[in-house]
Amino acid sequence: MAVEDRDVVAAPVTVDPPAEDSHCLVVDGSSNAFGVNATVWAAMAAYVPIRVLDRVIDTWGVGVAHWTSMTVQRWSEPAPAGTRHGHGGESALDPVASFRAELADDMESLQQAPGLPAEVPGMTTPDLASLLGDQLDLALLCTSLGMRQPEVMKLLRGKVPLTLEQINTVARVTGLAAEKIVQTVRPLPFGLVVAAEHPRWRHVWHERARRRHISEAEARLSGSYGAFALAARETSGKERNWHERLRRFLSDEELDPGGA
């Protein structure tokens, strides 16, 4: 219904089981790609992160989105061509009430999908090296983390994100609170976050997660920091094309599977 930088305003659509209530719009099967009636749950429209979207399934006319928007605002609108108003579902004992509750849970899960840390103008993030100060023992960290010095230096400077296991290790060997260590990872430029969370990259993060046996959120996070590190090594003063930086980093990673 509307698109912002990191979110969309969207209403869920279901086709199975065939369910509806009086706040729904039912799109006839002859008017959609499913071939069966599709139910638009207007009353459940909400902001959801754009990163949870995957691919276009069908394209509907503006009439459906307009009707849904008006219904959300409690305006009564005639049903667009090829659709009809839903009915029923007023009683808490109606079977559709249970289905609606499950759908609400699904929407809430989408809203809570892990996102990338983004820079906030005016806010600075101290790196782990600054937090440790004189207590920094590079050799001990290298040994404890099982990493080479260059990789540990990236962690210390906030260039790459710490995993939960690394956070706990650093906390154990330094005595620092894990909560303080988490706050030292430098957030990503907002433009990079918007690019990396765009649906066009969703299949790439799926594939990267599959290859590395990690979650999609971890694949997106480490890949985005890899692209950020690539951009940081460049001296060009031009505005950065983050989609291109992501493409280049992931292309180099394919050539060097052992890369970050």
Image (cartoon, rainbow, N blue to C red):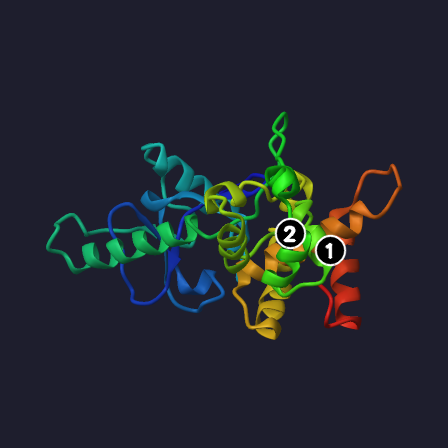
Q: Residue 69: x, y in percent?
A: 42, 38
Camera sees residue 56: no
Q: Earlier in the sequence, mark 2 or mark 1?
A: 2
Q: Residue at x 80, y 72 (%)?
A: 255
Residue 95 horizontal side relative to residue 4, left or right: left
Q: Is residue 98 above or below residue 112?
A: below
Q: Which mark is residue 196?
A: 2
Q: Residue at x 49, y 54 (%)?
A: 172
Q: Is residue 160 above or below residue 126?
A: below
Residue type of the residue flagged with mark 1: Leu
The image quadrant that residue 103 belongs to is: bottom left
Q: Cβ–Cβ below 8 Å for labels 2 and 1?
A: yes
Q: Nearer the viewer, residue 137 or 185?
A: 137
Q: Which mark is residue 246?
A: 1
Residue type of the residue flagged with mark 2: Ala
Q: Secondary structure at mark 1?
A: helix
Q: Secondary structure at mark 2?
A: helix
The image quadrant that residue 30 belongs to is: bottom left
Q: Nearer the viewer, residue 88 or 172?
A: 172
